[in-house]
Image (spheres, rainbow, N blue to C red):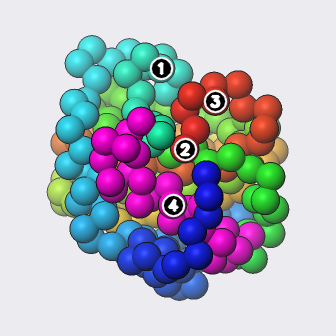
Amino acid sequence: MDRPTTRSPAVTSLLASFQSANHVTTPFDYWLLDKVLPPATADGIANLPFAPPAAPSFDGRREANNSTRVYFTPDNQNRFPVCRDMAEAFSSAPVMQQLEKMTGRDLSGGRLRIEYCQDVDGFWLEPHLDISVKLFTMLVYLSGEPELYDAGTDIYDATPQHNRVASAPYELNNGLIFIPGDNTWHGFSQRPIHGLRKSVIINWVTAEWRDAWELC
């Protein structure tokens, strides 16, 4: 994908959010964000015409529902301009440079992957580490219902028990960034989800990523 040089509203919003990020260092480095996307972009993603999985399987892994997962593929970028805008914004030089400066991660050899998630009651994720072919992980939350206040990603320590030590605030257009490593335990502990937990997950992955059809 060519990396545009003009600053779209999405690029401007991302850069402002990164610059005001709250950097937390315990139990690992992560960044909490707010006002990540322009409101029209956040609304546009949340209103994409993809239904939640009709009969999801809940075993603590997203892979259990691989057949129903939604990605910002070239086809979906052609169908939905908001998907293209997101892919172009994250591929832009200013955004990549700011992320590299903020996190210390070299993204120049990475490939962009964006997933749209709609999690329903019963969903959970076991404490886990992202696989080694993921260079960068970011989440943006897209539901604004107050009943979802506790639906943010959970942060765990590296002890064998993986105690939950924090949760990212789940509010409309808030976000979370971390660089996958050997101590970045995260997940979503089992608890009721009062509504539809919408989010996008942005990853930069290495050239070894096997499912190339998922990429932007």
Residue that carries the numbered disc 2 in the rendered image: 216
Magenta portion: prevailing SS class? helix
Disc 1 residue crowd, few under 14, some 14–19, many 20+, Cα 10 Å: few
Disc 3 residue crowd, few under 14, some 14–19, many 20+, Cα 10 Å: few
Residue that carries the numbered disc 1 in the rendered image: 66
Report the residue at 55% width, 62% height from top. Answer: 90
Label 4 – label 2 distance at C-alpha: 9 Å
Relative image position of residue 141 (x, y in whole percent): 37, 56
Q: Which amino acid type corresponds to the residue marked 4 in the rendered image?
A: Glu
Q: Is residue 65 magenta?
A: no
Q: Do residues under tags 4 and 1 come within 8 Å of each other at their CB atoms?
A: no
The residue closer to the viewer here, 38 or 192, is: 38
Residue that carries the numbered disc 3 in the rendered image: 212
User: Of discs 2 and 1, which sits in the foreground?
Assistant: 2
Residue 108 makes an appearance in the image: yes
Q: Is residue 91 magenta?
A: yes
User: Along the horizontal axis of the image, is 114 left or right of 82?
Assistant: right
Q: Which range of residues does the magenta coloring cover?
A: 75-100
Label 4 – label 3 distance at C-alpha: 18 Å
Label 2 – label 3 distance at C-alpha: 9 Å
The residue closer to the viewer here, 49 or 6, is: 6
User: Along the horizontal axis of the image, is 192 left or right of 116?
Assistant: left
